[in-house]
């Protein structure tokens, strides 16, 4: 099946008297397999439509006092139908020109500092790709995992996209995780690996400090002894 993508972005610049500029954007996209409806500001996602659950999702943290988006989800399916109609028109008008493709770049990291037997989240960040979509899969010690939580596609300033896949895990020494990315611009899947390797504090520094403290106390005792002897002589 051929994949066609149609995207619509609307950006508005807001400036205050102090000349601080913010960028408010709306992103609506559709294809044979993907559908997106997202609002954001300054490159950060504020809200997106979850078409599977049929709800709108506010993605701002609680401390930011997030604003509501009443009626946004009800508008999202309508925006999606408009996108599909525009896509059909664009396919005929532009006679299917070959689109420019950009290969993804992948990195892996843990959300928090890694501690053995303490639950954490492993993140696979895929960026710099065009067009969507990408497919992300995980393995643990070469065994496939079913967990595959993908974020919304987020636009980069250069016209490419980025996305996150997150995997809850409990670190065990020696475990090896991998994140594999499939994209139309890649000749073969792109795989990154991440190994649980927690540094255990060595005994060297503790021994060194202990010896240093002992020598210091010994020096103080010796100095006190000679001071008393000197006073007695006087």
Image: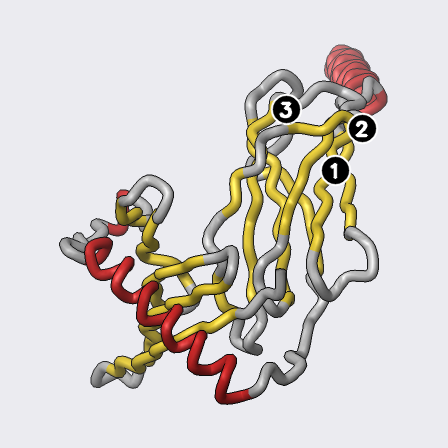
- Mark pair 1, 2: CA separation: 8 Å
The residue pinned by badge 1 equals: 178
Mark 1 residue element: strand
Q: CA distance from mark 1 to mark 3?
A: 19 Å
Question: In this view of the protein, can residue 219 be seen by the observer?
Answer: no
Check disc 3: other Cα within 10 Å, few if <14, some if 14-19, many if 20+. Answer: some
Residue 115's mark?
3
Quarter of the N terminus within the rendering = bottom right
Q: Position of residue 134 (x, y in %)?
A: 62, 55
Tell me how many marks there are.
3
Q: Is residue 82 left or right of residue 172?
A: left
Task: Find residue 163 and report its horizontal and vertical position in percent.
Answer: 55, 55
Chain-order first, disc 1 or disc 2: 2
Q: Which residue occupies 74% across, 37% down?
A: 178
- Identify the mark at residue 142; answer none if there is no mark: 2
Between 107 and 84, the one lying in front of the other is 84
Of badges 2 and 3, nearer the viewer stands 2
Quadrant hosting residue 3: bottom right
Q: Kindly state the secondary structure of the residue where label 3 is placed.
A: loop
Above or below, comparing residue 229 to residue 18 in the picture = above
Give the residue at x 69% y 58%: 183
Q: Nearer the viewer, residue 27 or 25?
A: 27
Classify 10 Å Cα crowding around label 2: few (below 14), some (14-19), many (20 and above): few
Residue 160 in view? yes
The CA distance from mark 2 to mark 3 is 22 Å
Marks 1 and 3 close (CB-CB < 8 Å): no
Point out residue 60 in the picture as x, y percentages from the top left corner.
Answer: 32, 50
Residue 15 percent coordinates (x, y): 26, 83
What residue sits 26% from the left and 80% below the top? 14
Judged by depth in the image, the label closer to the viewer, 1 or 3, is 1
Q: Are marks 1 and 2 in contact (CB under 8 Å)?
A: yes
Q: Are marks 2 and 3 in contact (CB under 8 Å)?
A: no
């Amino acid at each position: 099946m051929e994949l066609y993508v149609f995207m619509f972005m609307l950006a508005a610049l807001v400036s205050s008297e102090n000349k601080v500029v913010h960028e408010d954007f709306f992103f609506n996209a559709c294809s044979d397999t993907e559908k997106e409806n997202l609002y954001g500001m300054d490159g950060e996602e504020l809200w997106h439509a979850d078409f599977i659950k049929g709800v709108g999702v506010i993605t701002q943290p609680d401390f930011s006092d997030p604003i509501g988006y009443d009626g946004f989800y009800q508008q999202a399916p309508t925006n999606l139908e408009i996108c599909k109609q525009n896509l059909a028109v664009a396919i005929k008008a532009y006679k299917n020109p070959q689109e420019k493709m950009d290969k993804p770049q992948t990195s892996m990291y843990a959300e928090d500092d890694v501690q053995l037997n303490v639950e954490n989240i492993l993140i696979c960040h895929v960026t710099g790709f065009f067009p969507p979509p990408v497919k992300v899969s995980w393995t643990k010690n070469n065994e496939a995992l079913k967990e595959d939580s993908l974020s919304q596609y987020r636009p980069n300033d250069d016209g490419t996209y980025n996305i996150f896949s997150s995997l809850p895990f409990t670190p065990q020494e020696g475990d090896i995780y991998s994140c594999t990315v499939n994209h139309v611009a890649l000749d073969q899947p792109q795989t990154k690996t991440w190994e649980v390797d927690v540094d255990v504090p060595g005994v060297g520094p503790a021994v060194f400090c202990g010896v240093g403290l002992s020598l210091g106390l010994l020096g103080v005792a010796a100095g006190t002894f000679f001071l008393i002897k000197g006073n007695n002589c006087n």
